[in-house]
Amino acid sequence: MSAEVKKGDTLLEVRNISLSFGGVKALQDISFDIRKGEIRAIIGPNGAGKSSMLNVINGFYHPQDGEILFEGAVRDHMKPHQVARLGIARTFQNIALFKGMTTLDNLMTGRMIRMRTNLFWQALWKGPAEREEVEHRKRVEHIIDFLKIQSIRKTPVGRLPYGLQKRVELGRALAADSKLLLLDEPMAGMNLEEKQDMCRFVLDVNDEFGTTIALIEHDMGVVMDISDRVVVLDYGRKLADGTPGEVRDNQAVIDAYLGVSHA
Amino acid sequence: MFYRESGDFKTSYIQDQQIFPIGLDRWFVAVVCVFAVLVVPFLINDYWEKSVLVPVLVWSMAAIGLNILTGYCGQVSLGTGGFMAVGAYASYKLTTMFPELNMFLVVLLSGGVTALVGIVFGLPSLRIKGFYLAVATLASQFFLVWLFNKVPWFYNYSASGQISAPERFVFGIAVSGPNAPPWATYLFCLVFVVVFAFIAKNLTRGRIGRSWMAIRDMDIAAEIIGVPPLRTKLSAFAISSFYIGISGALFFLVYLGAVEPTEAFGIDKSFLVLFMIIIGGLGSILGSFIGAAFMFLMPVLFKNIMVGGLGWPTDLVAHLIFILIGGLIMFFLIVEPHGLAQLWRVTKEKLRLWPFPH
Ligand SMILES: Nc1ncnc2c1ncn2[C@@H]1O[C@H](COP(=O)(O)OP(=O)(O)OP(=O)(O)O)[C@@H](O)[C@H]1O
Ligand SMILES: [Mg+2]
């Protein structure tokens, strides 16, 4: 479909996106891009429209205006499960794991889009079905090792503590081997040690797997440390866009964070 | 005492993904299967066939079917009775229209017809969930029973409005009709139940089963991972209805022999199967068997003890059984939603660690 995207080229671009819910303008004329191989942070105060932006990107919300380009091609109106097949995975602000299933099954479900044996072989659990299961199991075990969650492989995730659930959710998103990973506040509610672990994982994923990452985060220290570029939203509008240094020195951003009145 | 998995190391993913990962379990299941196929047919008599074995097999089949839809995919259905009726009437029409058609095929095709009907009645599930979906399936229950009462074509214009199973043979031996020997009807049902229980187990532990459970546990996340909601829900409706249709066909052809839809496939049957999977264990194939056996046999047992043994009045005992079942359902819904199968699993885990609990 589209030409091979090299590191540093634009992987995803949103153009003039506007989204409103009744009277609430969640996003107003937002444009920015995400380059292949980078860690892109999206920041902003509560209710700025960050999660809504991710929901637009993965097809969960449909903006009234604007367009989205992925790998250089304009994307039509798509359902979330179609976007997943394009190569976009994500985690949620409020953990959205499959609570009744084990860690292993959660990650195996993450590989759904890559499995294709038909009903007949699956019913027999032989031949192609068994081979496929083993092949994907290997990949999933690699991710389990990477995230150091071997000991909870067979535990139903509903029983795990919060920090581990966040990690399993990252694992499930990784399992899809996507081109673009969207992380909605992966470190929220974690203690310092858990945060450091999670930062490490995000950097390693970016480094080892070469995955492009867009993440929403409130902890400014983390954002400044790990991201390549930052886009700042406030009240549904884009305030600033640039390297962490540029954004930190931007007067509009400082005002927004210090709560200067918008009157 | 020697029930354990230590020393039972897995050296490949194939081994780790077995249905029964523990060696002793595999032996136990093999012995049960051999016993059921090679020994029971020689011991079986009319009483055991009609009062215990065949009905438990038929209800297990229905329970597996509903468990796929409700326990695995999370779509509550109160239409089980109606779908069993579809299976029964499909088998009746098929075997009267094509008397030479092999009986295994008749039953399988009846399951297929029911699967198609299930897809149609599953369509609303994309839009409505939970309680509202249950009400919609309730409507299908009443509609289907009404249809089979109303349209004479379904019962071949018989004066009574009933359908009755003609005598049919497999390998020269009758499996339906009044002269079918108990061992033959039993084996006929057993083949379907064993084969399709294994198929259900395979489906639920693979890709399709995981996509059902993903929809059940968190449909939004499932969709964002790439699980297409409509297709997944409809596949659960189709496969679930296939099983329920087979159970309806066997219920009519082999067990009852003659049915009248309101009586045989009423709403009480829908609830019965739902209670089976709640008590046996939602999302468990083993639980479907346990629940079916429990719900069908417990009343028989209590009646034998209380009426036969203690001489209590029949209606009192009937009410006591109702109260007991109601109490059990509340207990399981509140305390152990995974049912008897989970209690069994926990016991096994304890056994495995015994005598060193830590
Ligand atoms: N489904 C929805 N229906 C109605 N309003 C919505 C919906 N989703 C988001 N909004 C509104 O859009 C605005 C942006 O919300 P969003 O969740 O994107 O903010 P956010 O930047 O992620 O905030 P936070 O940091 O609190 O997560 C808010 O005013 C919110 O109330
Ligand atoms: Mg948010």
Image (cartoon, coloured by chain):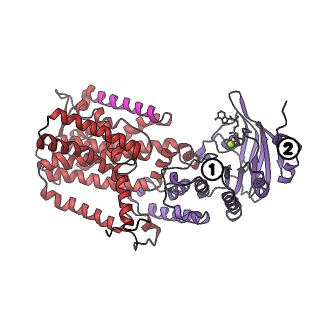
Chain colours: A purple, B red
Task: From the image, tell me which residue sits under label 1.
Answer: A91
Position of A53 compared to A241: left or right?
left
Q: Eyeballing the image, is B20 above or below B286?
A: below
Q: Give the chain of mark 2.
A: A
Q: Main secondary structure of the magenta part?
A: helix
Check disc 1: other Cα within 10 Å, few if <14, some if 14-19, many if 20+: many
Q: Give the chain of mark 1.
A: A
State the residue at coordinates (37%, 44%): B332
Q: Quadrant of ligand 1?
A: top right
State the residue at coordinates (25%, 46%): B58
Task: From the image, tell me which residue sits under label 2.
Answer: A254
Q: Eyeballing the image, is B128 above or below B196?
A: above
Placement of the N terminus of chain B among the 4 image quadrants: bottom left
Q: Which residues are magenta?
A: B129-146
The circle drawn on residue B243 is none
Residue B144 drawn in magenta: yes
